[in-house]
Image (cartoon, rainbow, N blue to C red):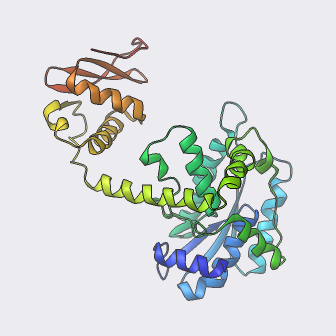
Amino acid sequence: MITSTVRRTVRERGLVSRGDHVLVACSGGPDSTALVHVLHRLRTELGITLCVASVDHGLRPESAAEVEQVSALASDLGLPFYGARVEVTRRGPSIQGRARELRYRALHEIARTHGATCIAVGHSQDDQAETVLARILRGTGIRGLGAIEPRRADGVIRPLLDCRRSELRAYVLERGLPFIDDPSNHQRDFERVRIRHEVLPVLLAEDFSLVEHLSAIGEEAAELNAYLDAQLPELPPLGERTVPVDALTELAAPIRIRWLRRWIAQETGLTPNRSHLVEIGRLLTGRGEVLLGSDWSVRRQSGGLSLEYREHRRTRSNRS
């Protein structure tokens, strides 16, 4: 079942091409262990070659031994293995976010060094559903609902995105494959863990197909995002920090919001949230200023909207 699902996912989503050398990222957990094993079974059929990598974040005493366990799995399958260690500081918020950033950086470096054309990671349909739900709870718009991409622009692919987590666990248990249960998956101070163990079970009691439904929302949002992005007018040259109001008012609201987001990101490096963009839209028929943070703002001036940078500006937007 898992093998046929992954085969269909890889083919229908165009995740690999014949001749690709795929780096499979494996933490040693049941999902990524299943990923290594299934891709090994499909490698000849798909016309790909594989290597395996595992990253030690140094956050738990047993993490080095877990990397060695992944190395042993790769050896049993006759696959090249590459280990890496990163240093994750424990200061500040979002230790998981910092670990993720360093992990992907290490994986991309391994891929470049060893000629891998893409990096396969073990996100499942449950991960997709949890991501969509987390973003809904934070107040996301359509763009955020797109959630986990099957294939990213940087070559990261998700062959397990149509597989349920319970099915992947059953797969490794049935085959006696060794795997690791990461204790951080049960630490309730992490948002994703709370959603997984506290929020989703309540919702699943109302609708046992909720994971599939949330995943479908993510798929539809991703398709809509791609369509809307294809409709965007060309951005002005880099350094053009004033745009005419007339040109913006002619755009449909969803297109205008996306265009403004891209323009602001191009000129400032900031990613404005939806409330910023709604306030900026109101400047088209009024006056005032919308603060974006980091001393940047958007101001209505005569017939245009202007991006301005001033140090130590006040902390409240104003419109009239």
Q: Is residue 264 left or right of residue 199?
A: left
Q: Is residue 147 left or right of residue 280?
A: right
Q: Quadrant of residue 87?
A: top right
Residue 192, horizontal then vertical, whole percent: 67, 46
Q: Is residue 135 left or right of residue 168?
A: left
**Residue furthest to the bottom:** 45
Residue 13, horizontal then vertical, whole percent: 47, 72
Q: Nearer the viewer, residue 84 or 296?
A: 296
Please state, as top left, top right, bottom left or bottom right, where the C terminus lies in the image. top left
Q: Is residue 303 above or below residue 221?
A: above
Q: Quadrant of residue 273?
A: top left
**Residue furthest to the front:** 206
Q: Is residue 94 above or below residue 230?
A: above
Q: Quadrant of residue 104?
A: bottom right
**Number of numbered discs present?**
0
Which residue appears at 58% of the width and 66% of the height?
A: 161
Specify whether residue 130 is in view: yes
Q: Is residue 316 above or below residue 303?
A: above
Q: Is residue 16 left or right of residue 90?
A: left
Specify whether residue 272 is in view: no
Please state, as top left, top right, bottom left or bottom right, where the N terminus lies in the image. bottom right
Residue 94, horizontal then vertical, whole percent: 65, 37
Residue 155, horizontal then vertical, whole percent: 49, 63
Which residue appears at 72% of the width and 51% of the height?
A: 201
